Image (spheres, rainbow, N blue to C red):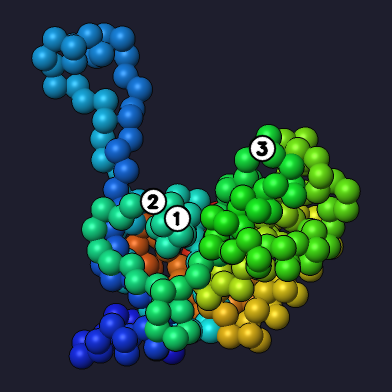
């Protein structure tokens, strides 16, 4: 059953004990610069009314809740607002309006592990070893935690001696493996995964999804974006379908995916 924003009467402590994620009337607008002709730019310089900046609404009045321990897939066509939503949850973007509240299992502040963009959080001129310390600190790990988990991170990422070389010289797959390994070893309350897992090879993808299933058994809350509907069916317990920056459908995996596949087939045939 879909969780909604119908929670009147709950104070913040009660809300946090029930939910890991509470999103209420969330809107995000971007200011987009459009290219114009030289003539129109000159008109603008001399008091004309040809603006080059316009507002683009990526998300509009989005509301949903995620209970602790639930795994939610975010689906939709390119440009539907999926990555914007994940960026807002990860605090990469500032919201235009609305509310986002994220809670740990005890109702306090949540530890979030975002894996949103390949190489995000890495310094390309540092070694893998140095980036484990650097990115781990960004995600809230103490120096002691990083020392304790260092070998496990390197082993999971399958890096070997490469960890002592600059990340700039690595391929995308190696950077992905390290980013995922650090994120899952921070013991997050909420794990946010964008489509970056599609970059890894098949064997590592399978390893990642096994780890996701282990985190599910531990009661972690997971939100992930994917175009791979087979993976959604395997992992997700609920699906939110975004269309044009709004929630088009939110519910059980089978029901939402059937509707989405029908819509996609209709769009392909039109």
**Callout 1: few (<14), some (14-19), or many (20+) C-alpha neighbours within 10 Å?**
many
- Do the residues bearing badges 2 and 1 touch, measured as CB atoms within 8 Å? yes
- State which quadrant residue 23 falls in: bottom left
Q: Quadrant of the N terminus?
A: bottom left
Determine if residue 132 is in view.
yes
Q: Vertically, is 39 above or below 134?
A: above
Q: Secondary structure at mark 3?
A: loop
Looking at the picture, how far across and down is residue 94, in whole percent?
33, 52
Marks 1,3: beta carbons within 8 A: no
In primary-sequence order, the first of circles 3 and 2 is 2
- Where is 194 relative to 213, above or below? above
Q: Find the residue positioned furthest to the right.
A: 161
Q: Residue 93: x, y in percent?
A: 38, 51
Which residue occupies 68% across, 34% down?
125
Q: Which mark is residue 124?
A: 3
Between disc 1 and disc 3, whose residue precedes?
A: 1
Label 1's element? Answer: helix
- Foreground: 128 or 205? 128
Quadrant of residue 257 within the rendered picture: bottom right
- Residue 93 is labelled as 2
**Observer-nearest of 249 and 6:** 6
Instruction: Measure the alpha-carbon separation of dots 3 and 2.
Output: 22 Å
Q: Residue at x 69, y 39 (%)?
A: 126
Residue 228 appears at what percent x and percent y? 65, 63
In the figure, 237 relative to 202: above or below? below
Residue on which disc 1 sits: 87
- Say left or right for 60 vs 144: left
Examine the rendering and report whether any part of residue 229 can be seen: no
Q: Position of residue 177 (x, y in %)?
A: 74, 56
Confirm or deny contact between disc 3 and disc 2 (CB under 8 A): no
Mark 1, mark 3: which one is toward the viewer? 3
């Amino acid at each position: 059953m879909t969780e909604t924003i119908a929670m009147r009467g709950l104070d913040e402590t009660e809300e946090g004990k029930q939910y890991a994620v509470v999103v209420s009337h969330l809107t995000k607008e971007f200011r987009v610069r459009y290219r114009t002709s030289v003539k129109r730019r000159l008109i603008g310089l001399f008091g004309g009314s040809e603006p080059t900046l316009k507002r683009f609404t990526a998300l509009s009045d989005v509301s949903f809740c995620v209970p602790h321990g639930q795994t939610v897939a975010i689906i939709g066509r390119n440009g539907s607002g999926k990555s914007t939503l994940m960026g807002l949850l990860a605090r990469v973007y500032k919201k235009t309006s609305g509310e986002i509240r994220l809670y740990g299992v005890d109702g306090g502040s949540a530890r979030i592990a975002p894996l949103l963009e390949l190489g995000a959080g890495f310094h390309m001129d540092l070694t893998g070893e140095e980036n484990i310390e650097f990115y781990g600190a960004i995600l809230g790990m103490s120096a002691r935690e990083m020392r304790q988990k260092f070998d496990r991170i390197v082993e999971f990422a399958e890096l070997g001696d490469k960890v002592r070389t600059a990340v700039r010289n690595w391929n995308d797959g190696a950077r992905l493996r390290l980013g995922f390994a650090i994120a899952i070893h921070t013991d997050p309350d909420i794990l946010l995964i964008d489509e970056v897992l599609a970059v890894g090879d098949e064997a590592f993808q399978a390893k990642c999804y096994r780890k996701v299933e282990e985190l599910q058994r531990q009661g972690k809350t997971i939100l992930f974006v994917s175009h791979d509907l087979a993976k959604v069916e395997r992992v997700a317990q609920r699906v939110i379908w975004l269309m044009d920056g709004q929630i088009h459908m939110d519910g059980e995996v089978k029901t939402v995916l059937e509707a989405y596949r029908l819509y996609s087939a209709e769009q392909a045939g039109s």
